[in-house]
Amino acid sequence: MNPVIDLLKSHRSIRKFRPEPVDQETVNQLVAAGQSAATSSFIQACTVIQVDDPEVRGQLMECTGGQVYVGSAPRFLVFCADMHRHQIACTMHDAEMRSGFTEQFLTASLDCALFAQNVVVAAESAGLGTVYIGGIRNQIQRVAELLELPELVYPVFGLCLGFPDQDPETKPRLPLESVLKHERYDDSQEREIIAAYDEEIREYYRTRTGGNKEMSWSEQISGMLVKEARPHMMDFLNSRGFLKK
Amino acid sequence: MNPVIDLLKSHRSIRKFRPEPVDQETVNQLVAAGQSAATSSFIQACTVIQVDDPEVRGQLMECTGGQVYVGSAPRFLVFCADMHRHQIACTMHDAEMRSGFTEQFLTASLDCALFAQNVVVAAESAGLGTVYIGGIRNQIQRVAELLELPELVYPVFGLCLGFPDQDPETKPRLPLESVLKHERYDDSQEREIIAAYDEEIREYYRTRTGGNKEMSWSEQISGMLVKEARPHMMDFLNSRGFLKK
């Protein structure tokens, strides 16, 4: 359709990077592009922590269960949902902030994601590769302590950044008819749609792994969802002042 | 830096649209671009509902407290965080899905935001304007009923889409030094940074409103945060199977 849409559609995660550094001016430009994303009621609730210290990077890597690129990528950014800045703004006007609402947790988290996605698009437009690291939430308490995050700030995800040293295929997405619905939520054809997509994903893994992995989308998803999903999250977020009501 | 970053930095919300339609093929392309965004563990937890029916659009407008562009924009999309599709996937393998985890609510919501931001960037690259509509969460229960959303699906935000009939300025963002921190969260200069930014925003409103509005960022934020923030959200989300643990 146009070069920007082509760029968006060519996205794939990059987990292997060339050693070339990404200079600070580039990082600043990417973050500025992130800031330009829409923000709910102008709250601007995203703060990025750029971690260069190899010692801390090593510890963050441990927190993710040993994802080596967290330690070795030229740059690593942690996107934090931040309502602490708003607490300071309230103090400046002797206003008593009402915090802890689920809505605030949601808007701050969404702000971060819109911001981060702009950073990713900007990075890819500059020839860089990225991978989001949700794995920092495996040990989110330890990550928050490492980065000295105050109350009302939590680390949403990390992002590795660097020049790609691999060229993986894009991964086929669900059929449009599953994802774009008209007027109302209609799932009457959903099983059939998923079954057809399952074959596509099975084939994708088969060719990509030389036959070593054969798994459909629904198999992968159901295998994941019979397990607990980071059951510590609610307690952690509560302890940081989020999701109290 | 490059045309894509220029595009990202030129973002502003558009609330007034020319009557020209946005054809279905374009919407499909934008949604496909959205699908290409990263997705946590391949869950692909975003479903878009395209609402064209003027009757429903009118009701959605009411839900937002009368934001007219919700009714009048050439296209209106509702981005839903969707774990219902995963429930179907589990059923296909006789697997018992463990749902209700905070982590699942978060990843599904983030998936939606990454997806939607790609749609916005794609739209702007095609000369379209957009505005996110968080206001659908004012009456989120009614929105969920209007769109016939099943359990484990909730409407995150809406998006108006059309060719711009206004050309507003971009809104200055927080200084980079507030938003990009190095190695750890350091807020020792935060009050001073906010105070300087406050002057910039005051001036922005002054020139933009012909002197009718004079408000700093911290005033605006503190005025908002002394109030409750959609206090019905936790109960609503619980009733839909989210945030139970």
Image: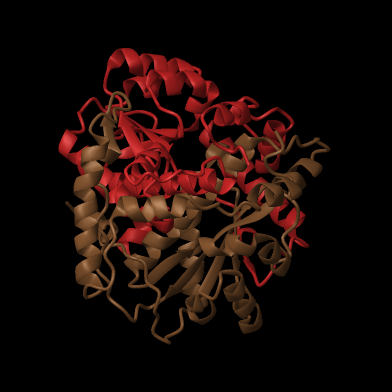
Chain colours: A brown, B red
Q: Position of residue B108 (x, y in %)?
A: 46, 45
- View extreme (right): residue: A94
In the depicted structure, whether residue B48 falls above or below residue A64? above
Q: Residue at x 51, y 18 (%)?
A: B65
In the depicted structure, whether residue B140 falls above or below residue A59? above
B179 left or right of A87 in image: left
- View extreme (top): residue: B55
Q: Residue at x 73, y 65 (%)?
A: A145
Q: Position of residue B243 (x, y in %)?
A: 59, 38
Q: Quadrant of residue B202?
A: top right
In the depicted structure, whether residue A228 falls above or below residue A189? below
Image quadrant holding the N terminus of chain B, namely: bottom left
Q: Residue at x 22, y 72 (%)?
A: A211
In the depicted structure, whether residue B204 falls above or below residue A21? above
Res A170 seen here: yes
Q: Position of residue A97 (x, y in %)?
A: 76, 37
Res B172 seen here: no
Q: Quadrant of residue A212?
A: bottom left
Q: Residue at x 36, y 67 (%)?
A: A13
Image quadrant holding the C terminus of chain B, namely: top right
Q: Position of residue A236 (x, y in %)?
A: 70, 52
